[in-house]
Image (tube, rainbow, N blue to C red):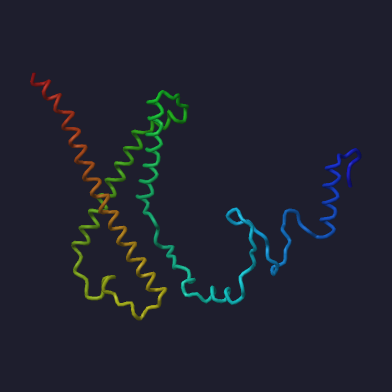
Amino acid sequence: MVRAGAARREIRQAKRAIARAESGKKKGKRIAKADVPRRTAKRGATGLRAPPLPEKQAAAKKRPEAEPEPVDEMEPRFTDAEKKLRALEKKLRAVKAIRALVARGVETDAQQQSKLRSEKALLAQLESIRAEAARGAAAAAAAEEEEPPDAPGATGDDEDMSGLSKLEQRRRLKKRKHLDKVRARQESLLQREARDSEARAARIALAAAPAAKRGRS
């Protein structure tokens, strides 16, 4: 039904909607048979595209590399400490960007000012998390040194995986790589904490030197 006094465009749209409803077609849906090639635009040129042949579909299904990679949900990508570190570093980068705006003379709003005020608390949290991670890495290294030497074939490198399936071999290799990454991250955190402590001690010494000179004079 079209209202009285409707415009020509509205009448045309109503007629099309009625015809579409009677034919069972849906609006915005391209209706074409599967075996009829469609004309498509590819890289600015027109061409014909048809569904793949049945033999090509069968070859793709039988392809050995089509097997999905095993995903071990028990192994997280990042530890809790690493997640906290990433979040704090992201917040500190935002604070640094706000300080650059202030240096250029840009007026800041209340939210940006609150972020600037929270910089000291963020730095304190960052230092505490780094110190805790360094202590954990040191404890893990000490425990690893105290462990007795592994028997032949007990380590991942000497493990015989010839009797395992391909899926199980991939899982073992993935777990071994994950453990190597965790050890490397712990070592890097420990080295970073050592560098930060050395730099902090150097800054304290430089700040204390002028005060000592003034006291002597």
Measured from the top left, where is residue 114 in percent x and y? 43, 30
Farthest residue in the top direction? 217
Farthest residue in the left direction? 216
Q: Quadrant of the C terminus?
A: top left
Measured from the top left, where is residue 132 in percent x and y? 28, 48
Q: Residue at x 86, y 41 (%)?
A: 8
Q: Residue at x 21, y 38 (%)?
A: 199
Farthest residue in the bottom direction? 163
Task: In the rendered view, tell whether residue 143 sits above or below residue 51.
Answer: above
Measured from the top left, where is residue 57 in percent x and y? 58, 73
Q: Residue at x 15, y 24 (%)?
A: 211
Measured from the top left, where is residue 156 in percent x and y? 29, 70
In the image, is 62 to the left or to the right of 209?
right
Number of numbered callouts drawn: 0
Task: In the rendered view, tell whether residue 59 sits above or below residue 204.
Answer: below
In the image, is 197 to the left or to the right of 164?
left
Task: In the rendered view, tell whether residue 145 sits above or below residue 99.
Answer: below
In the image, is 31 to the left or to the right of 45?
right
Kindly indicate the quadrant of the structure image that contains residue 125.
Answer: top left
Task: In the rendered view, tell whether residue 206 sits above or below residue 194.
Answer: above
Between 37 and 18, the one lying in front of the other is 37
Q: Residue at x 21, y 45 (%)?
A: 194
Farthest residue in the front direction? 45
